[in-house]
Amino acid sequence: MTVQRWLKAYTESGITSLVIRKKGSGRPQIINTDVREQLLKELEEPQGFKSYEEIRTWLKAVEGVEV
């Protein structure tokens, strides 16, 4: 989403319009629902992840998903 479209959506519909998850383009998801839920649990842990690279490493090692 470009900044202009973001501002227009925000102006017309508020913050809610920006956080609603819209239907994708039809491309299959790389991270399925079960893996996504596990990742969210891991993110809630106090030690968490320090970087995006740590998340990628975890996904590959634990879930076999390469992103």
Image (spheres, helix red, strand yellow):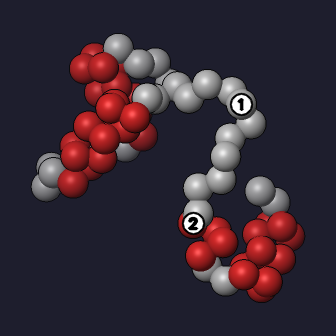
> Badge 1: how crowded within 10 Å, few (<14), some, or many (20+)?
few
Q: Amino acid at mark 2?
A: Val
Measured as percent of width and height from the top left, residue 34 is found at 32, 32
- Could you say which quadrant of the image residue 58 lies in? top left
Residue at the spot 83% in from the left edge and 67% down from the top edge: 5
Mark 1 vs mark 2, CA separation in Å: 20 Å
Residue at the spot 52% in from the left edge and 25% down from the top edge: 30
> Badge 2: how crowded within 10 Å, few (<14), some, or many (20+)?
few
Helix, strand or loop at mark 2: helix
Give the mark toward the camera: 1 or 2: 1
Looking at the figure, which quarter contains the N terminus? bottom right
Residue at the spot 65% in from the left edge and 53% down from the top edge: 22
Q: Is residue 44 visible?
A: yes
Helix, strand or loop at mark 1: loop
Q: Looking at the image, which is closer to me, 42 or 50?
A: 42
Q: Looking at the image, which is closer to me, 48 or 63?
A: 63
Q: Which residue is mark 2?
A: 19
Q: Amino acid at mark 1?
A: Gly
**Residue 37 bears which disc, if any?**
none
Q: Is residue 49 left or right of residue 7?
A: left
Q: Looking at the image, which is closer to me, 41 or 49?
A: 41
Q: Is residue 54 visible?
A: no
Q: Which residue is mark 1?
A: 26
Q: Is residue 12 left or right of residue 45?
A: right
Does the residue at mark 1 contact the one at mark 2 (Cβ under 8 Å)? no
Q: Looking at the image, which is closer to me, 50 or 55?
A: 55
Measured as percent of width and height from the top left, residue 8 is found at 83, 77
Measured as percent of width and height from the top left, residue 42 is found at 22, 43
